């Protein structure tokens, strides 16, 4: 048998495989989501996210110092709001002394170079667990009223020192509104990482446990995208870029690798992907039972997301991955 192509030559040993690897993960690819709660010296487990924690601000600052040492360059902050502060206006979200604002200040004081991104959406602050203001009669989430509230929230994050605001709400027109408001208030250096193609997904379940933010009624399908759709993701993303998004995002990641690739081929801004809580929980659960090798599953998953076209990956496995890369 005469073969023209001995393809296996390039797979012959580990050294060759490493030389011809098309995709390599590095610490600065990752954005680590952090869950912050009230109090001092608090580190709380999250039942559906094994080995992941909610921390008070002081403990979060300690964690961020360690992350910086490890080479992680960005964190994405989420807060768990006291029930007593939740309402249907979301006004706690723009409290200059709120938990998010305090967290941003403390982190930037301790590790000024860390790129701090903040979640912008009303769900942790909403008595209904929705990302926007609810029209109580109809149950519909009001778009323009929500964008107004989120604009205030964004400005308060910028004032606290956030490097990027990261709107995850999926209201229409919010990126343009935020960009305009940031410019008007003297925050021209603050960027926007937009959750541009965010799907209504069952994979957010564990996250909603972590923040106690599950919707009290209905679902999020009138604002998050239908997972049957691809072209709509391009449309949403191009609009966000036109409105001024600096980084766009596809979320979740592994069931949406086709969308990541499509977006990466379409836009000229960095594309991020969010490897969400349910994706974390699936790997953890299978590994706990001995059904998957966790370390291999983590590296294969994250590499596939990068290979699909994500320049940045928000993942709860960021620390684990960095440790594995250094081995
Ligand atoms: C809320 C928000 C969600 C996530 C990030 N921001 C949940 C939701 O939309 O219900 C999910 C993250 C994850 O599951 O890891 N605006």
Image (tube, rainbow, N blue to C red):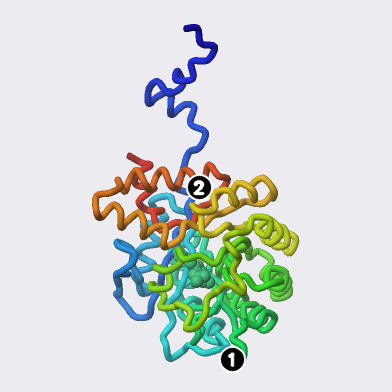
Q: Image point 50% across, 47% down: which residue?
A: 305
- Towards the viewer: 154 or 59: 154
User: Which quadrant of the rendered structure holds the C terminus?
Assistant: top left
Q: x, y (%) of residue 181? A: 71, 75
Q: Image point 66% across, 78% down: which residue?
A: 147
Left or right: where 114 falls relative to 321 = right
Secondary structure state at the residue bearing disc 1? loop
Q: x, y (%) of residue 213? A: 45, 78
In this rendering, is residue 260 above or below 125?
A: above
In this rendering, is residue 19 above or below 150?
A: above
Left or right: where 243 falls relative to 289 = right
Asked if the beta carbon under badge 1 is closer than 8 A to the nearest atom of ligand 1, the reply is: no
The residue to which callout 1 is attached is: 136
The residue to which callout 2 is attached is: 305
Disc 2 crowd, CA 10 A, few/some/many (<14, 14-19, 20+): many
- Residue 135 visible to an observer of this rendering: yes
| Sequence-first tag of 1 and 2 | 1
């Amino acid at each position: 048998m005469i073969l023209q192509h001995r393809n296996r030559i390039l797979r012959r040993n580990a050294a060759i495989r490493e030389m011809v690897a098309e995709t390599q993960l590095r610490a600065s690819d990752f954005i680590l989501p952090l869950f912050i709660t009230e109090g001092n010296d608090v580190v709380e487990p999250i039942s559906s996210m094994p080995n992941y924690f909610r921390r008070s601000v002081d403990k979060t600052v300690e964690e961020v110092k360690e992350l910086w040492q490890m080479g992680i360059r960005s964190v994405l902050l989420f807060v768990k709001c006291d029930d007593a502060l939740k309402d249907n206006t979301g006004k706690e979200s723009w409290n200059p002394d709120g938990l998010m604002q305090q967290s941003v200040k403390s982190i930037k004081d301790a590790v000024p170079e860390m790129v701090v991104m903040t979640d912008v959406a009303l769900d942790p602050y909403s008595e209904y667990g929705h990302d926007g203001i609810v029209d109580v009669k109809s149950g519909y989430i009001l778009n323009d009223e929500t964008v107004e509230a989120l604009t205030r929230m964004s400005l308060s994050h910028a004032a606290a020192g956030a490097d990027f605001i990261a709107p995850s709400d999926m209201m229409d027109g919010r990126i343009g509104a935020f960009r305009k408001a940031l410019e008007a208030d003297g925050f021209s250096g603050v960027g926007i990482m937009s959750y541009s193609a965010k799907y209504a997904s069952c994979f957010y379940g564990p996250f909603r446990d972590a923040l106690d933010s599950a919707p009290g009624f209905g679902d999020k399908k009138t604002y998050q995208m239908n997972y049957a759709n691809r072209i709509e993701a391009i449309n949403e993303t191009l609009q966000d870029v036109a409105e001024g998004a600096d980084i766009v995002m596809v979320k979740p990641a592994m069931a949406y690798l086709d969308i990541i690739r499509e977006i990466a081929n379409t836009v000229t801004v960095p594309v991020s992907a969010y490897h969400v809580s349910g994706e974390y929980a699936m790997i953890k659960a299978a590994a706990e039972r001995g059904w998957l090798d966790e370390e291999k599953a983590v590296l294969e998953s994250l590499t596939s997301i990068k290979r699909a076209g994500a320049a940045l990956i928000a993942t709860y496995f960021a620390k684990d991955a960095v440790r594995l890369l250094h081995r």
